[in-house]
Image (spheres, grey):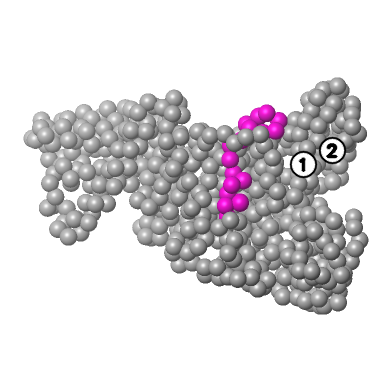
Amino acid sequence: MSEESGLIYRISGPVVTAVGISPRMYEVVRVGDEGLMGEVIELHGEQSVIQVYEETSGVKPGEPVIRTGQTLSVKLGPGLLTQIYDGIQRPLEDLEETMGVFITRGVDADGLDLSKKWEFNASVSVGDEVSGGSIIGIVQETETVEHRIMVPPGKSGKVTSIQSGEFDVTTTVCTLEDGTEIAMMQEWPVRTPRPFIQKNAPDVPLITGQRILDFLFPLAKGGTAGIPGPFGAGKTVTQQQLARWSDAQIVVYIGCGERGNEMTEVLTEFPHLMDPNTGKPLMNRTTMIANTSNMPVAAREASVYTGITIAEYFRDMGYDVALMADSTSRWAEAMREISSRLEEMPGEEGYPAYLSSRLAEFYERAGRVQTLGGGDGSVSVIGAVSPPGGDISEPVSQGTLRIVKVFWGLDAGLARQRHFPAINWLSSYSLYPQALDQWYRDNIASDYPEVRTKISSLLQVEAELQEIVQLVGSDALPMDQQLTLEVARMIREFFLQQNAFHDVDTFSQLDLQYEMAKAILTFQEESEKAMAGGAGLEDVVNVPARTDLMRGRFEEGYAERIGELLGKMSKQIAGTMEDN
């Protein structure tokens, strides 16, 4: 550790200028008598500008600044899962034990428990050739996740010694012929993406169990999605549903600058949520980073990088990881505050000129990749955006939309109508269906893409007809258009609405989603035939089996019964012709 020290020259909120040291860019330094943690972000001749990750009130010019010689890094190894960290990987539960509910300044806490012993089972032998990313052993970290211990990137050679047994994360478990010692823990600088061999095409969907997302606006594994929406439209509930139900094996949840009460809700609910695939607590495969809006802004800026580095680490083991960032707007606001204190030239709405490139840098770390160890892993990034007043023409929303390939636009109007998830099907989009269609044809049904297209076009037609209806009323429309409105209402109420808090309706399998969509199209076809044979619109719409079909989705075993209900409905619709 380099002990070169200098003095504080100037303080402006979390931005401190020091003289008398000559650090490198992004080096971590200790600031003031309390040793607050900071990072060098600008160098001007003799002066070093530092962003401090803690509250700087009470710090004064003339106090010491000490170099550490290291960049901002996270500790990666067994013990990451089930943890709740702050923005710079200090475990909040450990801090609470020692200092109560408020974090004392200048406190250091290791990201991993360095004294805890883990059962390490070696999977390579003496004499084996290994390289960066090779898996050398397994630790059963939680009941549901095995932690694969890897050779750090950049290290390679022949194994000269390896031992199984109980060790802490700093003990050497493997030695290579060039003398390299490998422990279960490795450190990685958060601003540097972890290496991989190549990115793969995004041609496998991330299945979420949410019908409007999976069916109309799917996200690929390794894909990027933005959820912009005003206050109260359901961003946080949507992200919690994705964390709970998506078929990712690891979840990293970043509460970046969120309100304390929202974060409390997440922190109290998550540990009690059950993982539907294993029946064990969801926290067994989750790492959380909590940086509430009253925590220092500089740590908020770092929290996003801390989260994505942890996600990449699990990706390198061959896992599919879902990363939730809630919300990237608060991250951008932290950048804006620091930028203004640095007296940089402001861009649009006061955000720094490099806002778009920082957003792109973050989202580009997503992807489905071939790992250094030769396996497949992915990081899917879902970023919530909280535009002021719900106006998505502001810079953060626009910068996000230019980068992400899926846009799930939340709508306050739908939320007020109690239509949840309140995702607007007219303004949302996904650019992945083309790449995913072959997967759907092979795994669900050969006509899956065509059914999706028909459902989408019916919703588009309804939007056009609604304008006419508002002028002249629905009775003035021809019968076939009145039927289209009924079918579109069925899509909205039966298919797109989904109750996140209902035991059965909260999750919908892909093949059931397809069956439900087909049922709606079958209703349309049968009704058209019946009306051509003289049946009235009222008769067709009011057949009892249609109501049973729509209500049945809240009952256990619906997937097995949907075919039977559909048959009944077709019979009853055909019967309306005879009645007339």
**457 to 50, vertically: above or below:** above
Tags 2 and 1 touching, CB below 8 Å: yes
Residues drawn in magenta: 359-376
**Mark-to-mark CA distance, 2 and 1:** 9 Å
Quadrant housing residue 326: bottom right
Residue at figure coordinates x 61%, y 51% from the top left:
362
Crowding at dot 1, Cα within 10 Å, few <14 / some 14-19 / many 20+, comes out as: many
Give the residue number, with chain letter if any, for mark 2: 183
**272 to 320, vertically: above or below:** below
Which dot marks residue 22?
none
Judge whether residue 405 can be spotted in this image: yes
Depth check: give the residue in front, 12 or 499. 12
Q: Is 368 inside the magenta-drawn segment?
A: yes
Numbered marks: total: 2
Residue 211, percent from left and from top: 42, 41
Q: Is 491 inside the magenta-drawn segment?
A: no
Residue 126, percent from left and from top: 86, 23
Judge whether residue 556 can be spotted in this image: no
Residue at figure coordinates x 10%, y 32% from the top left:
533
Residue 550, percent from left and from top: 32, 40
Q: Amino acid at mark 1?
A: Gly
Give the residue number, with chain letter if any, for mark 1: 77
